[in-house]
Image (cartoon, rainbow, N blue to C red):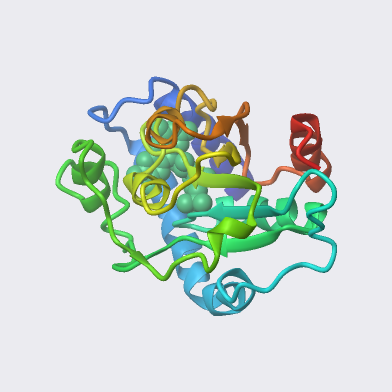
Amino acid sequence: MKKLLTIFLTAAMALSFAACSNSSTSSAQVADNAQNTSQAENKDEQSAAVSDTANDDTSAENNDSSEGGKILVAYFSATNNTEGVAQKLAEGLGADIYEIIPEQPYTDDDLDYNDSGSRSSVEMNDPSARPAISGTVENMEQYDVVLIGYPIWWGEAPRIMSTFIESYDFSGKTLAAFCTSASSGFGSSDQALRSAASGATWLEGERFSASASQEDILAWANGLGVK
Ligand SMILES: Cc1cc2nc3c(=O)[nH]c(=O)nc-3n(C[C@H](O)[C@H](O)[C@H](O)COP(=O)(O)O)c2cc1C
């Protein structure tokens, strides 16, 4: 019975996001938010472990600049999905990894896309919103390639990704974005980021499901020719 309910909710969620609309609400979205809520709770437990490796500027041993260049995987993840993809990507490439941590963490209420007054709704309705980031990438100059990950929020990259991209000079670097979503495709979700870092060479981005295999994730990265 529980399995049937899960299948039903998953299918309903996929339909609800197909339109990528900020204004539409449905009970399926509420169901997904409940899932996000429990994921967010898990995130609290896991974030300490992740930030140890993400933000201490440690280099993976084989992040060798003599090949395609030194690679950084930088990601924001509110409920862990993008984090899982980012970790598989960085581990597979031998890249450094950096978590974009909001100065003010997103609560479950903040992530409630059924509430037009929620923080995420308000931010995404304001293209100039720039949520503050806690911490910085040390020595961004050392990276030749930056792979940038985020969850899709109403078809776009969350505004905090604009904060990130505007915080550094990416001129001359090679960039590519990846995202996770409930069902939306990659679309033009990196458009604002591309505009903000127009001096970089942007490669084609990719959308992954939360459960994407490392093989699939690396197939995208290797296809970019960055390694
Ligand atoms: C505010 C908000 C808006 C979202 N908008 C979309 C959307 O437009 N399309 C979609 O497929 N999923 C959407 N989702 C679902 C997330 O993209 C999906 O759960 C993603 O994997 C979450 O990644 P994270 O765990 O790294 O935060 C949205 C989630 C939130 C919280």
* Between 35 and 70, the one nearer to me in the picture: 70
Apparent side of residue 203 relative to residue 110 in the rendered image (left or right) = right
Q: Quadrant of the image for the C terminus? A: top right
Residue 115: in sight, yes or no? no
Apparent side of residue 181 relative to residue 26 in the rendered image (left or right) = right
Instruction: Determine the image quadrant of residue 225.
Output: top right
Instruction: Determine the image quadrant of residue 220.
Output: top right
Image point 38% across, 36% down: which residue?
Answer: 196
In the rendered image, the vertical position of residue 84 relative to residue 217, given as above or below = below
Image point 45% across, 63% down: which residue?
Answer: 40
Image point 36% across, 33% down: which residue?
Answer: 154
Question: Residue 186: image x %, image y %?
Answer: 54, 27
Image point 42% across, 27% down: which residue?
Answer: 191
Apparent side of residue 124 relative to residue 40 in the rendered image (left or right) = left
In the rendered image, the vertical position of residue 179 relative to residue 169, given as above or below = above
* Between 7 and 91, the one nearer to me in the picture: 91
Question: Residue 195: image x %, image y %?
Answer: 39, 29
Apparent side of residue 50 relative to residue 130 in the rendered image (left or right) = right
In the rendered image, the vertical position of residue 187 relative to residue 133, given as above or below = above
Question: Residue 213: image x %, image y %?
Answer: 78, 45
